[in-house]
Image: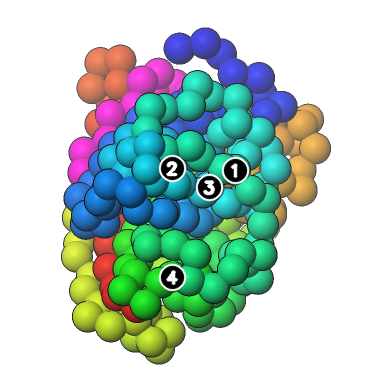
Amino acid sequence: MEEPAQSDPARIYEEYLGRTIADPWTRILLEYASLGSGERVLDLACGTGSVARQAAPIVGERGKVTGLDINPGMLAVARSLDPPNGAPIEWLQGDALALQLPDSAFDVVLCQQGLQFFADRARALREMRRVLVAVGRTAISVWQSLDHHPLYESLFRATVRHLNAEIADVALSFSLGSAHDLKSLLIEANFRDVQVIPRSHEVRLPSPERFVAFTVLGAATSVPAFAALDEPRRAALIDAIVRDTRAAVKTFRRRDELVFPMSSNIAIGCY
């Protein structure tokens, strides 16, 4: 793996975290999406485009895939990657709370690890339903709570000590861990036949010594407390967190890899 530029969190995310975490979890999400040939798919909060790229060959040339994200850096990386076979992918910058998309434009809306970051989750879900056709459906994945992820818990607790922040400020990715809360949100947005399925998957990350640095740098794409730091302060923060989490990282090290389970709740619902 090439060393990504430290000034580009989106590239770091794709090369270290996207390929090892997002891509395998996309395959799991698509098991529940049941995509068909010719369908129109929206990948909401698409990041660097893992879901969009894997959906395109499934829906085929008669289908259509749109990847939408608020972060221009993530979209720039998505656009720079070789397009897959199958449906063309349109990459759009936009806000999940106010989609600049017409009503009834998609057969399926997918959202992998994005809902927990939205400032108004209920509004985002209403927007997702609005752009679905009357027989449309959604499939959404969110991480289970931080106490299911001890390696990340150690990392984030070290981070808040050095940032003088609250755990909720930096662990946003694990902030919608309740299956009950997730199901309630979809029902309140008028989705029908809502189910929430827990899934776990063993993650294998190369270069264990880079895990903390790359995870913190990757988080700069979505966590304001990280993104606000300039590069010298970010580097100092990373050095401190590496020291504090050395024992935790060692627990999950298997030779040249980190091996640990991650757990998601996957929600599916119909229009």
- Is label 1 in contact with label 3 (beta carbons under 8 Å)? yes
**How far apart in space, not on screen, are marks 2 and 4 (Cα)?**
17 Å
Q: Amino acid at mark 4?
A: Leu
Please indicate whether residue 244 sits to the left or right of residue 57 in the image: right
Q: Quadrant of residue 119?
A: bottom right
**How far apart in space, not on screen, are marks 4 and 1 (Cα)?**
18 Å
Question: Residue 215: horizontal and vertical position, in percent?
Answer: 51, 36
Does residue 215 belong to the magenta stretch? no
For the record, the magenta segment spans: 201-210
Q: In the rendered view, tell whether residue 235 sits above or below residue 102.
A: above
Q: Amino acid at mark 3?
A: Gly
Look at the image and tell me whether residue 135 can be seen: yes
- Is label 3 in contact with label 2 (beta carbons under 8 Å)? yes
Q: Give whichever of discs 3 and 4 has the lower sequence position.
A: 3
Q: Which mark is residue 72?
A: none
Q: Which residue is mark 1?
A: 91
| Element carrying mark 3 | strand
| Element carrying mark 1 | strand
- Is label 2 in contact with label 4 (beta carbons under 8 Å)? no
Q: Which residue is mark 4?
A: 132
Please indicate whether residue 217 sits to the left or right of residue 126 in the image: right
From the image, which quarter does the N terminus lie in? top left
Residue for point 21% across, 44% down: 201
Q: Quadrant of residue 103?
A: bottom right
Q: Amino acid at mark 2?
A: Ala
- Is label 1 in contact with label 2 (beta carbons under 8 Å)? yes
Residue for point 39% across, 46% down: 63
